Amino acid sequence: DIQMTQSPSSLSASVGDRVTITCQASQAITNYLNWYQQKPGKAPKLLISDASKLETGVPSRFSGSGSGTDFTFTISSLQPEDVATYYCQHYNSLPYTFGQGTKLEIK
Amino acid sequence: QVQLQESGPGLVKPSDSLSLTCAVSGYSISSGNWWGWIRQPPGKGLEWIGYVYSSGITYYNPSLKGRVAMSVDTSKNQFSLKLSTVTAEDTAVYYCARFSGWYNYWGQGTLVTVSS
């Protein structure tokens, strides 16, 4: 199975800060990598597919990059409504596992 | 707009089976796509349980060791999950979702507690 390792596991930043989360796959997954945002008590929401494709309606301050084994998720200017847990998920080969999550808080 | 809604018992006894149904609206299951179940234990991360295609083809997470079965009922536009021989470790919020490489439509989730 491909293991997805996210870092950091938690993060505290100020409004307006640039925030970066990384996701590393245990083997190459080309660009088969998605990012989700989950707010407390809610289902996850797809933000980015195929490593860098922003979903319709998702603010442009969110972006993703990477290929192979190393991926990055960035919020260019943190907003209060971005408080959530973020997950990466690959779909290179079954089982399509998730990262362990990064909990983002406002400082 | 595609919408999914989970339903089923919120409390299951240890060693019993957990059965959930996901009703889909705004899209015909028979049109295709994979339909999946994902769970999240309290305070923990997301775990993929498995997928079922509209034709009935299934893929399951090997970590669940043969306890999972999924099916599709195209006449009711819904799909189902059955998890057998449950323990307290199966306590989680269970989500159904449409899978196209990514999960772009989710149900709201339903909490299932395993307890006597």
Image (cartoon, coloured by chain):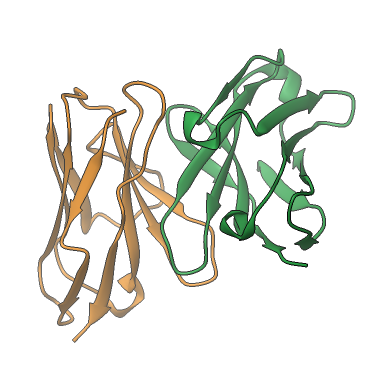
Which residue occupies 65% across, 34% down? B67
Which chain: orange?
A
- Asked if one can make out residue B29 in the rendered structure from this viewpoint, the answer is yes
Q: Nearer the viewer, residue B80 or A50?
A: B80
Which of the image's four quarters has the C terminus of chain B?
A: bottom right
Q: Is residue B33 left or right of residue B86?
A: left
Q: Give the percent coordinates (x, y) of residue A78.
A: 20, 72
Instruction: Give the vertical position of A79 relative to A107 (above or below).
Output: above
Q: Give the percent coordinates (x, y) of residue B4.
A: 69, 46
Which residue occupies 28% across, 27% down? A32
Which of the image's four quarters has the N terminus of chain B?
A: top right
Q: Residue furthest right?
A: B75
Q: Is residue B7 left or right of residue B93?
A: right
Residue B93 falls in image quadrant: bottom right
Q: Nearer the viewer, residue B30 or B64?
A: B64
Which residue occupies 61% across, 50% down? B95
Which chain: green?
B
Q: Nearer the viewer, residue A103 or B27?
A: A103
